[in-house]
Image (spheres, grey):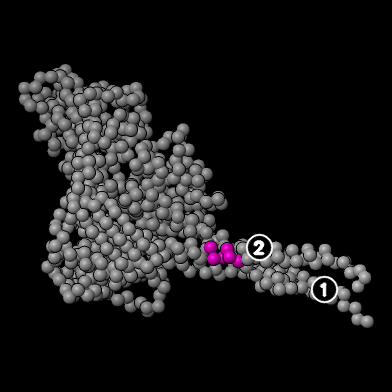
Amino acid sequence: MACMNEDGQWIVLMGLLVAVGLFFLALIINQSALVGQTTAEGVLEFPKNDIRDLRKAVFDYTDKFGMVPDTDETKKNVQEDIIAISLERKNAVVSFSVGQRVSISGQQAYPVEIHYNNGVTEYDETVYHYRAYE
Amino acid sequence: MVNDSGQLYTMEGIAAGLVMLLTAYLILSTTSIYTPGDTHIPDMQLEQLGSDVLAMMDTPDREGEESQLVGFVKNGTGTCGGDELRDEFLDNCKMRSDDPDENLRAQVYLSYRRSDGSVNTTPLSSVDPEFTGRENAVRVTHWVHLPPGSHSIPNIDTSRPHAVLVEVLLWRV
Amino acid sequence: MVALIAVASMVPGLLAGLQSSGIDYDAVAYRTGVILTEDPGWPGWPVYPPWEMKDQYHKDEIERMGLAVSNETPNILLSTKIEKFFNDTFFTTDDYRSKAIFGEIPYSYNITLRSLDGRYNHKVGQETPEGYGYIRRVVKIKEPSVAVIDGSLKERYTISPGDNSTTRTFTVRLDFSRLLNASIDPAYRIDPLTEPVNITITNFSEYLNKTDETVKNATLKSVTFRRGSSSIRFPFPYDTENPDLYTLSLDGNPYDLKPEAPVESNISLVLKPPATSLFPLDQNSILDIRFTFENDPPHTNITGIHYYDYNPKNVTRPALKPAVLEVAIW
């Protein structure tokens, strides 16, 4: 091999470059199909309505039992209702508590703490709920 | 004798030709590629609709009134309250700006805690004769505070208020 | 060679890119549905004035248009926001795209709101084609309250005998600290800063001075405003008649705030939020709206203060109206 034949090297090199470029592009476009899948799934997975509903249930509980001491059987039973049914039917671990009434700028409010965990989404909130007029 | 220096060119040529043919074939026979995301969208739309309707049925139109949903649940299984719930729920789901969306069906269940502490789920509306159990259904739920009193719900402690869960199974035929 | 084989197996993925924009429409429609039904918009509460009170010159300050009463009351829509949103002479197609729909692609849209009783039947956007992304939301609409003072309240609002003054003043009092009470759910709250205040006096003939048979009407001299104990000027000249600020009609005919005209049977004053926001008021103010009648000898015996509060005998709050909102995107 006195002198190597270097003809065609350029073509081969360009071919390799084009192949790599096509590989990369096709990979990107292939992954884009998954984008649509996760959008709708993500919406279904996040328990927006469940959390809103739970908050409303806890606020209704606060309206009815905020003034009642924590040792009261009825109050404990209703709390147990929400916790047990959430666990059994909604697959979510829920806990909540209502604190002593405080006065905020002249209005009565209850500090409410809510914890929600359905295995995928965890939600914790501390909020002041103004008691609705009966 | 046999010169194999042109092998690479030939292989290249064949591969290039194959790629071109394949691409041309695929472009000419373009079909919609079924992406996995499609199945979830109708479910998402139905679930949002059902949740909205239950939330609106539980909102009193005037302050201090009892909501429609609590009224239906109080009637319970005894006086067809569940069927009325189901019918009112479906009417609200079908509402649209032009003609109503007739292809929706629903079934109502109630989850509550029995006097012994265990959770029971009982059907509240009468069984739909077309229900096969294999429909692509979504489940929407809503909490209801039930005042004390007999509500024709089996095994419930009637002396205390309850927090119960109304569950509605909603599907399209 | 291996790369070429790999490329050949991924070529079908190349064509998926052409079809995937079809999935976007439902997601965009869902997002627009959430913005419209669950978001009060920005600027919205707690920032004042809210987006529905911006005029032509401040339209760019609107970042997001949402129809909900507040972020604590999803799916309850405010009628003033609805009227503003569906006004397509005020908003252009680009406004809807940048303030409600968002996204880089200019989507075509069709948003409709229809109430069960047919009173609201609004539509904005283009005609829908065969296939489109869609979401349907079920909502309730909150309408403004009305204070109706009819003949049945005559006992409360008649002068004591022996009062010989020639002017008669009748006041409607809005006590903001009582109205903007956090214990009242925002879905049922009366908020004069964001909703119109409607005062309707009907059967006015009951309040006329019956001792004189020839008296058929009384002259309403002016409608003035007071804050606490001092009077405040209406920020515009009294003779401006601007339906965006207020409407005053006597027996069905429109007048400005110094009508000096006779009224026989009814008076209706609607004070709109853009006017209320111009007064220097805060959450603890008391706004008095004074109707002054002047005749010599006096033709009417009306007097007193009518409280615009949550008492159902004083103010009628209409029931929430069920409606359905549909968003189509393509």
Q: Which residues are magenta?
A: A30-35
Callout 1 amino acid: Leu
Residue C322 on the magenta span: no
Q: Would residue C68 be found to the left or right of residue A110 on screen?
A: right
In the picture, the disc for residue A13 is none
Residue at the location (51% across, 58% down)?
Answer: C25
Residue at the location (15% across, 54% down)?
Answer: A67
Residue B16 locus on image (x, y percent): 77, 70
In this view, the residue in front, C268 or B62, is B62
Q: Secondary structure at mark 1?
A: helix
Q: Would residue C140 be found to the left or right of residue C285 on screen?
A: right
Q: Which residue is mark 2?
A: A25
User: For residue C79, what is the image quadrant?
Assistant: top left
- Residues marked 1 and 2 touching at CB (< 8 Å): no
Q: Residue furthest top?
A: C296
Residue at the location (91% across, 73% down)?
Answer: A1
Q: Which residue is mark 1?
A: B8
Callout 2 amino acid: Leu
In this view, the residue in front, C274 or C246, is C274
Q: Residue furthest left?
A: C162
